[in-house]
Amino acid sequence: MILSRKNRIMIFLVAVVLVFAARLFYIQVLNDSFKSDANNNSTVHMAVYPTRGLIYDRHGNILVENKTCWNLMVTPAEVEPFDTARLADILGVERSFIEEKMAWYRKYRTRIGYRSVEFIHQMESADYLRFAEVAYQFPGFHGEAHSVRKYPVNAGGNLLGYVSEVDAPYIKKHPEYKSGDYVGRAGIEASMEHVLKGEKGNRIYYRNSRNKIVGSYLDGRMDTDAVPGKDVTTTIDRDLQVYGQQLMAGKIGSIVAIEPSTGEILALVSAPCLDVEKLDNMGKYYKEIASDPLKPMFNRAVQASYPPGSVFKLVGGLIGLQEGTLKPWYEYPCHQGYWYAPGKKVGCHAHRSPLDFEEAIMMSCNSYFCYVFKDIIENPAYPNVQAAFDRWREYVLSFGFGQKLGTDFPYELGGNIPTSDRYDRIYGKRGWKAHTIISLSIGQGEIGCTPMHLANLAAIMANRGYYYTPHIIKGTREIPIDERFTRRNYTLVDTSAFNVAVHGMWRAVNSGWGEGGTATIASVPGLDICGKTGTAQNPHGADNSVFICFAPKDNPRIAVAAYVEHGTWGATWAAPIASLMIEKYLAGEISENRKWLEKKMFEGDLISGLQYNQ
């Protein structure tokens, strides 16, 4: 049967209609995704912000928790005429504030469109509830709940860091964040951001033809819940941290305390300390803090490069013992200094002479360690001074100096240990020898390190030759720590060499009256504190006061480094502060016969009148 041309056209048209009808039925009835796409222009998405994970100390005490605050939002296109004076009274703001805001929104209404924008930032819950009771009288205004940080105790502003809203440059580098999101900006908040932040949820609502929200989209089937951030447990001892901050009040510098047997950081104090009360509103206080010449945001514990001073003599002496250029019984003279060229000497305080190795540590003799350094660098076992120096440098690096220790704390500084190439460039390959760089022997010259490096040295002495990489996050089942924090890092000096040096440190603190120990101020009966004082030259004023120590002598539980700028002698400020930290940690309280020393440290003010422009 042959169809006419007219019938063929009719059949084709019917087929086309049937195809379109079937497709339309599929789109409208069978497939929700097309319906969803069609409705995109009539829906509004609202983020559901997760609660940020809490931060605990090693004993389960809360260092950082959350509180709920509200951002009052406004959708200008939905605002109807309202009583400005009444709203101002409810919100506790000036009427002019509302009028200026609304005038700005009207001016840029086209640009804003139907977006909701922030009207008031971080209202307390009590303030927001006053508005919520009458919110129906102010169409276009609504609240968004946010979780902000709360600090039960003033402990560790610098180590905790802070949280703030992301800005355009941050979003450009981290596109996973959107405007209105918050991110950890420093300290633990930054280093553990990936764990603490959680995951945002989403709520989708219908808008009607007048762009007003009328209900949940698809009965909430497309909504997602926020996933709270995980809690983080730190290695910090809250009470010790607070005590360290009290001791460093009125001073510039740092205290770092480490548990030698694990590398866990017990306290990390940078002074002047960053007040935690300002952390939850850095937008308000940032300019004030950033313009402070004392730089409270600068974490001196891990970012300041200082000369170590005389505490570095321990490293030099141990290298000499390992190299065989020094024996514990070797004695060297000191006539209030070491003459290294006509008319030039490294000065030293008055003490008996000559001294052996233990006594040189106990009395911190500069001259002794100049002899030790000279013998190492001009050791005839090496073909030239460069080779001997390179070997010396290898030893020093094995103690963790001159490099980042690899802690889990952000923005750690590596410090500096000079190279032979550097001296070749300055003096020529045959233009230098031990006397040219003799200041290195007493921790001066081109050496730079952080208080964290010095605390690590104290831990090495406590462990007799090895250290665990210092860390501030305590491993848990949910958040295990990297295996590098559980690995021993040995120095290139044999462990047997450390005992004589440790005994010298013990004598420095515990020697009898008149024996010449430089750190007897740090002695606490029964605690067996071992320590080494240091006085480091400071181009910005009085010398810096330095002290490292650990206790007890056997089976040590804590190692401490204290560094006080403009503190003069090591025994003046750093040694008392470090010993008080140890006594507080091991004994729980300060003995009555040392209360006077505690009071002096609490009240000591080295900042007033200081012109500080570092």
Image: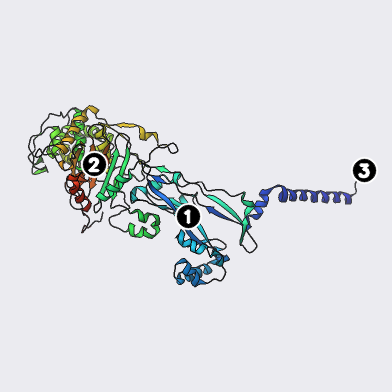
Q: CA distance from mark 3 to mark 2?
A: 111 Å
Instruction: Tell me the CA gap for discs 2 and 1.
Output: 42 Å
Dot 1 corresponds to which residue?
Answer: 146
Q: Nearer the viewer, mark 2 or mark 1?
A: 2
Identify which residue, 2 or 322, lies in the foreground. 322
Where residue 203 appears, as percent x and y from the top left, is: 57, 53
Of 74 and 216, which appears nearest the observer? 216
Q: Where in the figure is residue 349, as x and y percent of width and height?
A: 10, 43
Quadrant position of the C terminus in the picture: bottom left
| Quadrant where the N terminus is found in the figure | top right
> CA separation, marks 1 and 3?
76 Å
Residue 369 visible in image: no
- In percent of the image, x 34 and y 43: which residue is there? 236
Measured along the vertical axis of the image, is residue 261 above or below residue 130?
above
Check disc 2 and report the residue beneath it. Answer: 583
Mark 3 or mark 2: which is in front?
Answer: 2
At label 1, counting other C-alpha atoms closer than 10 Å, the crowd grade (few under 14, some 14-19, many 20 or more) is some
Of label 1 and label 3, which has the lower sequence position? Answer: 3
Circles 3 and 2: CB distance less than 8 Å? no
The crowd level at tag 2 (other Cα within 10 Å; few <14, some 14-19, many 20+) is: many
- Circle 3 sits on which residue? 1
Q: Is residue 130 left or right of residue 372?
A: right
The residue type indicated by label 1 comes to: His
Label 3, secondary structure: give it.
loop
What's the mark number on residue 552? none
Residue under the image location 61 percent in, 49 percent down: 222
- Whole-percent x and y of residue 174? 47, 49
The percent position of residue 261, horizontal first and vertical second, equals 30, 34
Helix, strand or loop status at disc 1? strand
As shown in the figure, which amino acid type bears the numbered disc 2? Glu
Looking at the image, tell me whether mark 2 or mark 1 is earlier in sequence order. Answer: 1
Residue at 25 percent of width and 52 percent of height: 249
